[in-house]
Amino acid sequence: MLRYFITKRLVVYRDMMTNLAAAPSGVTNRRRGRNRQLVLDVLERTKRPMRAYELLELLREDGLRAPLQVYRALEQLIADGTVRKIESLSAFALCTQGENRAAFAICSVCGHARAFHDPALDRVLHRLAGKAGFTATAATVELSGLCERCAHE
């Protein structure tokens, strides 16, 4: 009896996995795509780097309850090149250009972060990595200071 039960469960699991693999990704990934979009919307709306737990607090009303939901969405957005982690703040910021090298200007007063890309910076980083015998796959430069608005207040 136990052998029949285990065999039956394995067949059901195999069939379920086969169906998932054959279905379009939008159908099988609906929940994960929703969470990802919610996180992206908050980052676009706030226009500043946010920690994962800040995102979770803002998204509780939308049904996100566990930090893991936010971290998984952030992981996917980072893999897409849509979001970058700003290590000095332990926060995540929108990076719309999706390149492997980004620079952030971060205001130490209001927290506003602006991402920018410069081919000259890319060349310098590539040259420095080469001199060190290192092949960089990604780089993030963080500049800390005052944004234009805070500098004039």
Image: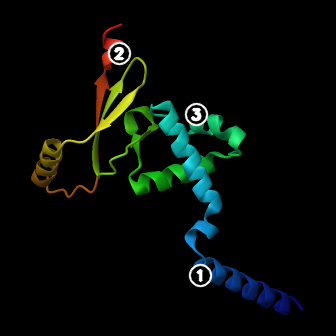
For the point 32% across and 37% down, the residue is 115
The tag on residue 54 is: 3
| First in residue order: circle 2 vs circle 1 | 1
Quarter that holds the C terminus = top left
For the point 50% across and 38% down, the residue is 43
| First in residue order: circle 2 vs circle 3 | 3
Q: Where is residue 55 in the image (x, y as percent from the top left)?
A: 58, 37
For marks 2 and 3, give the CA distance: 24 Å
**Nearer the camera: disc 2 or disc 3:** 2
* Residue that label 2 marks: 149
**Secondary structure beneath disc 3?**
helix
**Nearer the camera: disc 1 or disc 3:** 1
Q: Which amino acid does label 1 sit on?
A: Ala
Dot 2 crowding, Cα within 10 Å, few <14, some 14–19, many 20+: few
Dot 1 crowding, Cα within 10 Å, few <14, some 14–19, many 20+: few
Dot 3 crowding, Cα within 10 Å, few <14, some 14–19, many 20+: few
Residue furthest to the right? 1
- Judge whether 148 appears above or below 65 on screen: above
Q: Position of residue 24 (x, y in %)?
A: 57, 74
Which quadrant of the figure has residue 29?
A: bottom right
For the point 43% across and 19% down, the residue is 110
The structure's colour scheme is rainbow
Q: Which amino acid does label 2 sit on?
A: Arg
Asked if residue 66 lies left or right of residue 114, the reply is right
| First in residue order: circle 1 vs circle 3 | 1
Asked if residue 124 lies left or right of residue 84, the reply is left
* Residue that label 1 marks: 22
